[in-house]
């Protein structure tokens, strides 16, 4: 059985930090894709001035979500086509055939996880959250948006994130909830909690490497 580690969180909430931990634990995070605006690479993954440690976002899933749900800024979260569902299901099965353990991170999971859970063999979920005003300010700075626009986007994702967590809990899927500020303050503890959730053996060198990846 293939275990998937799902990173659930809204934009600028710390999803890339958690995905980076998973990557440095040796967990495959999918297809990096080519992002022309990347300022540098981290282990072959695009990274940016606003996200210097890497993004670790599976481009294959992102393309399906973009096509099936519209722009991340105003997603069509209440509807998706059979074609979208089948493409997502096929990609899940491909990842599961390739890996006994794999990860997936995208803020779009706030509104796609509810149906993606139907296709995953053995999911566990890491839900990351951050102070709301800090997320608004970070999104505004990254995209040069007025604060009210960023507040509108983040408010939508806040509700979707809460709904996705409710769905995860209702299905009895193992869930670890982390606060972004706490992860930065104590990376070693966060890595330990993540490893306990995943419940798989890791090499001795990997946990310190994962903690160090966000400790500087």
Image (tube, grey):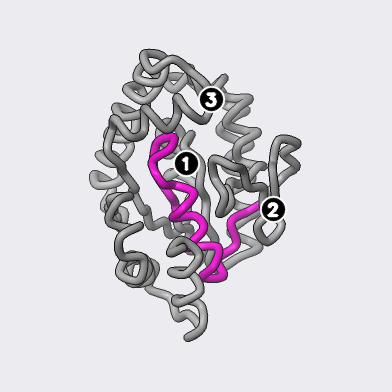
Q: Which residue is mark 3?
A: 143
Q: Secondary structure at mark 1?
A: helix
Q: Nearer the viewer, mark 2 or mark 1?
A: 2
Given residues 1 and 67, the one toward you in this image is: 67
Q: Residues within 10 Å of mark 1 (few under 14, many from 20)?
A: some
Q: Which labelled disc corresponds to residue 41?
A: 2
Q: Secondary structure at mark 3?
A: helix
Image point (72%, 44%), residue name: 33
Given residues 29 and 50, the one toward you in this image is: 50
CB atoms of marks 3 and 2 within 8 Å: no
**Mark with earlier residue (3, 2):** 2
Residue 122 image position (x, y, % from top left) = 43, 59
As measured in the structure, the alpha-carbon distance from the residue carrying label 3 to the one carrying label 2 is 20 Å
Image point (51%, 58%), residue name: 20
133 in relation to 179, above or below: above
As measured in the structure, the alpha-carbon distance from the residue carrying label 2 to the one carrying label 1 is 29 Å
Instruction: Left or right? Give the position of 165 relative to 75.
Output: left
Q: Nearer the viewer, mark 1 or mark 3?
A: 3
As measured in the structure, the alpha-carbon distance from the residue carrying label 1 to the one carrying label 3 is 28 Å
Within the magenta stretch, is there residue 33? no
Q: Which residue is mark 1?
A: 116
CB atoms of marks 2 and 1 within 8 Å: no
201 in relation to 55, above or below: below
**Mark with earlier residue (1, 3):** 1
């Amino acid at each position: 059985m293939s275990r998937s580690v799902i990173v659930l969180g809204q934009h600028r909430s710390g999803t890339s930090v958690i995905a980076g931990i998973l990557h440095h634990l040796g967990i495959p995070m999918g297809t990096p894709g080519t992002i022309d605006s990347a300022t540098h690479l981290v282990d072959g993954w695009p990274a940016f001035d606003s996200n210097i440690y890497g993004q670790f976002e599976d481009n294959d899933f992102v393309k399906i979500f973009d096509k099936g749900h519209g722009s991340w800024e105003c997603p069509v979260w209440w509807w998706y086509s059979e074609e979208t569902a089948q493409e997502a299901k096929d990609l899940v099965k491909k990842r599961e055939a390739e890996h006994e353990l794999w990860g997936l991170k995208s803020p779009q999971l706030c509104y796609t996880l509810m149906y993606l859970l139907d296709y995953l063999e053995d999911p566990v979920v890491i839900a990351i959250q951050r102070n709301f005003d800090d997320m608004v300010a970070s999104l505004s700075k990254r995209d040069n948006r007025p604060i009210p626009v960023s507040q509108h986007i983040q408010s939508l994702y806040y509700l979707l994130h809460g709904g996705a967590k409710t769905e995860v809990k209702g299905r009895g899927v193992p869930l670890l909830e982390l606060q972004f500020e706490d992860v930065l303050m104590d990376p070693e503890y966060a890595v330990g909690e993540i490893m306990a959730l995943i419940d798989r053996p890791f090499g001795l060198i990997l946990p310190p490497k994962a903690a160090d990846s966000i400790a500087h």
